[in-house]
Amino acid sequence: MRQTAMIKKIATKQLQPGMYVEDTGLTWHEQPYLFTHAGLIRDSQQVERIVEEGYLDVFIDTAKGFDVDRPGSPGYDDLVRREAETAQDGAAAGETNALEREMPEAKRIFTDSVRYAKSFMGDARLGRPIDFVESGNMVDAMIQSVSRNAAALLSLAKLRASDEYTFTHCINVSLLSVLFGRHLGLDRDALRLLGLAGLFHDLGKARMPEEVLNKPGKLTEEEFAVMRRHPAEGFLMMRQDKRIAQEVLRGALEHHEKFDGSGYPRNLSGDMISPFARIIGVADVYDALTSARVYKPGMPPNQALRIVYELKDSSFYPGHVEKFVKCLGIYPLGSFVKLSNGEYAVVVAVNPKNTLHPTIKIVCDAALRKTPPRTLDLAAEVAARGDGAPKILTCLDPRPLGVDLSGLDD
Ligand SMILES: [Fe+2]
Ligand SMILES: [Fe+2]
């Protein structure tokens, strides 16, 4: 079986022959200086070429190749270990609805919001005025559903096979921002504005040429210059409607700015970046990594969190990534896990007060043969059976094991 990936970010000039480069699936306009061509580094000439081409950073997988010697700053594994040690057990989540009960309403909200995202992106593409009025109701419904049960909507967003990335991405980023904002302690009014900013953060992409927008490979300088305009394009479109709050405009305009000033469009750094944009920035990269696109399957949640974690000092506001990891849990929704009884399961709901014991759906037997899905609330199992309850042993990448997790919400 494949070893657990050990992904870390290093500077391209630290690359050495024998290191294995991991493909994050992030495109050039998301991380312009990131080298993402997967494979083993053969010789030092290859390193020189990568550095000369202007790439500054690269992710390596130390389970597949050499590591770099560096004094150990606490890594993602340390964070997860600390989290596992301090995670509380058994406390009620304070949610009023069980997952199953919230599901029909969550499905309705999700379908409605994808339909709405299609209509506002379509209007924006055709230069028609955008109906922003519906967005308020949409985000309100989302916040209400999340406060009844946080996992229901998120499970739809994450488990759905995504051939409509442009639209589902708007919804996912809005939803993840709301969940993260709630975790950070924002009040209801702030959450509503944050949800709107997340919903419209990529509105400007509607004005980007389709062939550039969906290009899987590296963009040319010219194409990249075009793509970099999408935050400002969205900002200009929204500014025409005087009812849209300043925080929403800034959330969209600044979502690609980075803490160290390497982002765009204005190279803002540190506290100059608006609080909403800092939150949306984290949600945006996480969703881009975990989403399936036409040219790549989605990355497993724990692997995506590793990548986001490695970007914490350069891209994101101090402390935000650690809190985001806490917010999503040790076994984030959508994780493929191996159980102590040998079976394999997908995490379908995370109890924020008991992240060690999520609700799972068992999908494969010990020989990795698909079985009829069986839902199991691990917290309830532990309460009923104590040590006899199945435990999660590890998160795995389903892709090399040939397991397809799409369509599980049906
Ligand atoms: Fe964007
Ligand atoms: Fe985005």
Image (spheres, rainbow, N blue to C red):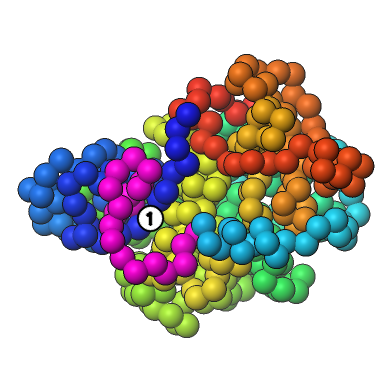
Secondary structure at badge 1 equals strand
Task: Name the residue type under label 1.
Answer: Lys
Q: Position of residue 221 (x, y in %)?
A: 20, 53
Q: Residue at x 74, y 19 (%)?
A: 372
Q: Position of residue 331 (x, y in %)?
A: 64, 48
Please indicate whether residue 225 sits to the left or right of residue 162 in the image. Answer: left
Q: In this orientation, which residue lies closer to the viewer: 222 or 90?
A: 90
Q: Is 291 rendered above or below residue 132?
A: above
Q: Position of residue 110 (x, y in %)?
A: 71, 42
Please indicate whether residue 366 sits to the left or right of residue 144 in the image. Answer: left
Q: Is 201 rendered above or below residue 1?
A: below
Asked whether mark 1 and ligand 2 are closer than 8 Å, the reply comes as: no
Q: Is residue 271 magenta?
A: no
Please indicate whether residue 241 sits to the left or right of residue 59 in the image. Answer: right
Q: Residue at x 72, y 54 (%)?
A: 355
Q: Which residues are magenta?
A: 58-76
Please indicate whether residue 220 sits to the left or right of residue 157 in the image. Answer: left
Quadrant in the rendering for residue 167: top right
Q: Position of residue 199 (x, y in %)?
A: 60, 56
Q: Is residue 65 magenta?
A: yes
| Dominant SS in magenta | loop
Residue that numbered label 1 is attached to = 8
Q: Residue at x 68, y 27 (%)?
A: 343
Residue placed furthest toward the front: 387
